[in-house]
Image (tube, rainbow, N blue to C red):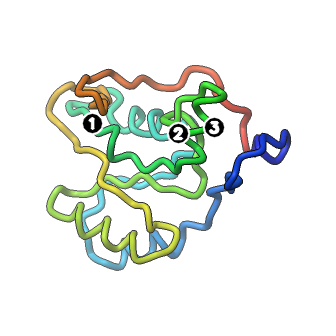
């Protein structure tokens, strides 16, 4: 973690989000919900993970910027260092695509676990734009979110 290598003096200090996901995921699997896809967003962050889902598909994904849970310390750090949080690796998180009928149930199950307490429904699979991920911004615009090209941050594993 950058703040461990180079003390940046954040208060409160930024803590690693690395966490074991087995119990969290086990609870969802045992709930009989209609899960389509699950993956941790370690390589390339949320943006790259979502692009890998829709790449060459006949559907797209639209996410809502305001619904993406990003802790305030990370928001501040990303502003200082210029990183886009959509591309930052997250080893203690999971991206889940579930049926629209089960999305709220899945989110509620995640929130029952301390690791998933900040879980949110951040978007939806859509008919358009095919093969693309789009972000609805907090100011009302929409932009295409591409795959990460190169490394935004040093690899963590």
Mark closest to the chain's N terminus, 3 or 1: 1
Q: Can you give x and y, in whole percent of width and height, for residue 26 in the image?
A: 45, 75
90 shown above or below 29? above
Between the residue at mark 3 and the residue at mark 2, the CA separation in whole angstroms equals 16 Å
Label 2: element kind: helix
Q: Looking at the image, which residue is at 42% across and 35% down?
A: 52
Judge from the rendering whether residue 76 lies leftward or rightward of residue 33; answer left or right: right
Mark closest to the chain's N terminus, 3 or 2: 2
Instruction: Say which quarter of the image contains residue 143.
Output: top left
Q: Tell me if mark 2 has few (under 14), some (14-19) or many (20+) residues whose alpha carbon lies within 10 angstroms of its own.
A: many
Mark closest to the chain's N terminus, 1 or 2: 2
Q: Tell me if mark 3 has few (under 14), some (14-19) or many (20+) residues whose alpha carbon lies within 10 angstroms of its own.
A: some
Mark 1–mark 2 contact, CB under 8 Å? no
Q: Can you give x and y, in whole percent of width and height, for residue 100 in the image?
A: 17, 56
Q: Tell me if mark 1 has few (under 14), some (14-19) or many (20+) residues whose alpha carbon lies within 10 angstroms of its own.
A: many
Examine the rendering and report whether any part of residue 157 can be seen.
no
Question: Which mark, by number, is residue 45?
Answer: 2
Q: Can you give x and y, in whole percent of width and height, for residue 108 in the image?
A: 31, 71
Q: Give the residue at mark 3.
A: 77
Between the residue at mark 3 and the residue at mark 1, the CA separation in whole angstroms equals 27 Å
Examine the rendering and report whether any part of residue 53 can be seen.
yes
Total of numbered circles in the picture?
3
Label 3: element kind: helix
Q: Give the residue at mark 1.
A: 61
């Amino acid at each position: 973690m950058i703040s461990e290598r180079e003390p940046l003096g954040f208060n409160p200090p930024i803590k690693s989000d690395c966490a074991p996901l087995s119990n969290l995921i086990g609870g969802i699997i045992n709930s009989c919900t209609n899960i389509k896809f699950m993956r941790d967003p370690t390589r390339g962050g949320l943006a790259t993970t979502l692009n890998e889902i829709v790449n060459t598909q006949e559907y797209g994904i639209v996410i809502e910027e305001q619904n993406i849970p990003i802790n305030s310390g990370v928001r501040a750090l990303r502003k200082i260092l210029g990183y886009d949080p959509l591309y930052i690796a997250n080893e203690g998180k999971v991206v889940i695509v579930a049926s629209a009928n089960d999305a709220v149930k899945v989110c509620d199950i995640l929130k029952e676990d301390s690791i998933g307490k900040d879980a949110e429904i951040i978007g939806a699979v859509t008919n358009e734009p095919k093969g693309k991920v789009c972000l609805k911004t907090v100011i009302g615009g929409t932009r295409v979110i591409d795959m990460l090209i190169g490394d935004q941050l040093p690899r963590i594993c």
